[in-house]
Image (spheres, rainbow, N blue to C red):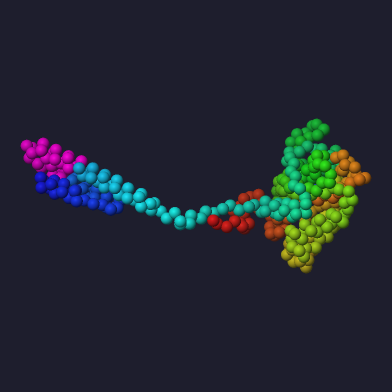
């Protein structure tokens, strides 16, 4: 046993390690479960009782020496690793991670806003919880007017003269603009609207609109037609045609609904346009003098036009989405189709 202890002590002095792996191998070789020092401790049981004291001391000293030497080797390996710099290559490109994508309704809203910004329109927003006055009364829908039935309304509070409700259209924002801004006004109002509709492929209780309003001296129906034509060509392509059909809205006179030539069949007739060659995109008209006067604008001096369109509808026409519910269900398979984001 004496020779074995001396042999290990001598080897210990010679021991050199260059890597963490070599240090670990040395530790296992001496101190591991089947290591040389561990084996000596096993043998110690067979040592004669009168020698136990001497060898016990020697063995403990040996174990301490081995442990200290391995610790020292470990420290010097660590030092040389950190002195030679990090082992990772910091110039390697990072791991790519998937980015989310914009919702189709946001994409189209931004396109509509950008087009009208180019035409010189400002952007305005108003409250989603509105009062009856701004949604109906000031827009020429008096109490009990049958046209109120066109827009099934969620009331928040009832029973008093000006109840609160969830706005059924963004036309309420044009009233707020007329009340608060100086003339001329040229503004678009994007926003969320609410109607008490049964949810189906063609209707939803929440959707989005963009309202437009232009008021100045001498604004005519020809200006309205030109604004809508330019918008339609920016949105659906430069060969797009429009047609205006007479319609009715309480807040415009005359009123019109606008169709664009079908961007799929280019007017020949297909299942998207139901064989007609035309797709309805918005409602519009000349602002009714009653509406101007209600907001304190002199209708003998000023005139204007307004229009309103559904963002989901424009997006459906642009991408041939056949069910409105897709916009609100957050099905990743649908949303990924609009993924314009690239991985970094
Ligand atoms: N507010 C109408 C709706 O929600 C859309 C509309 C039609 C807005 C004609 C207008 C307009 O400004 O002139 O159905």
The stretch drawn in magenta includes residue 251? no
Q: Nearer the viewer, residue 319 or 100?
A: 100
Q: Which of 13 and 200 is in front in this view?
A: 13
- Residue 217 in the image: state x and y as whole percent: 88, 48
Where residue 140 sits, quadrant-wise, is top right
Q: Give the range drawn in magenta.
A: 39-64
Q: In this view, does 33 lie to the left or right of 154?
A: left
The stretch drawn in magenta includes residue 51? yes
**Which SS type dominates the magenta stretch?**
helix
In the rendered image, which quarter contains the N terminus? Answer: top left
Q: Nearer the viewer, residue 21 or 311?
A: 21
The reply to whether residue 33 is in sight is no
- Residue 318 in the image: state x and y as whole percent: 71, 59
Residue in the image at 16% along x and 46% along y: 9
**Among all residues in the image, which is located at the extreme right?**
300
When the figure is inspected, residue 268 is found, relative to residue 308, above or below; the finding is below
**Among all residues in the image, which is located at the extreme bottom?**
268
Residue in the image at 10% along x and 45% along y: 2
The reply to whether residue 158 is in sight is yes
């Amino acid at each position: 046993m004496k020779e074995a202890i001396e042999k290990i002590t001598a080897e210990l002095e010679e021991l050199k390690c260059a890597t963490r792996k070599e240090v670990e191998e040395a530790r296992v070789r001496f101190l591991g479960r089947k290591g040389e020092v561990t084996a000596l401790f096993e043998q110690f049981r067979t040592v004669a009782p009168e020698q136990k004291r001497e060898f016990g001391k020697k063995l403990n000293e040996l174990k301490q020496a081995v442990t200290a030497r391995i610790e020292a080797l470990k420290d010097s390996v660590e030092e040389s690793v950190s002195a030679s710099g990090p082992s990772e290559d910091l110039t390697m490109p990072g791991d790519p991670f998937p980015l989310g994508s914009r919702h189709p309704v946001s994409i189209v809203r931004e396109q509509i806003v950008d087009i009208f910004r180019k035409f010189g329109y400002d952007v305005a927003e108003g409250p989603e919880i509105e009062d009856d006055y701004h949604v109906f009364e000031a827009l020429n829908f008096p109490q009990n007017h049958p046209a109120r039935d066109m827009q099934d309304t969620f009331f928040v509070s009832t029973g008093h003269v000006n109840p609160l409700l969830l706005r059924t259209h963004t036309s309420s924002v044009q009233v707020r603009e007329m009340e608060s801004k100086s003339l001329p006004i040229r503004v678009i109002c994007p926003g969320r609207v609410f109607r008490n509709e049964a949810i189906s492929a063609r209707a939803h209780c929440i959707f989005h609109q963009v309202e437009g309003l232009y008021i100045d001296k001498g604004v005519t129906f020809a200006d309205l037609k030109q604004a809508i034509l330019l918008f339609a060509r920016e949105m659906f392509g430069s060969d797009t045609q429009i047609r205006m059909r007479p319609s009715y809205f309480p807040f415009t006179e005359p009123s019109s609904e606008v169709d664009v030539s079908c961007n799929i069949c280019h007017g020949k007739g297909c299942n998207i346009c139901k064989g007609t060659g035309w797709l309805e995109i918005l409602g519009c008209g000349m602002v009714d003098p009653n509406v101007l006067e209600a907001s304190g604008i002199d209708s003998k001096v000023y005139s204007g036009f307004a229009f309103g369109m559904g963002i989901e509808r424009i997006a459906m026409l642009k991408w041939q989405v056949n069910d409105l519910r897709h916009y609100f269900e957050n099905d990743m398979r649908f949303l990924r189709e609009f993924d314009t984001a690239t991985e970094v």
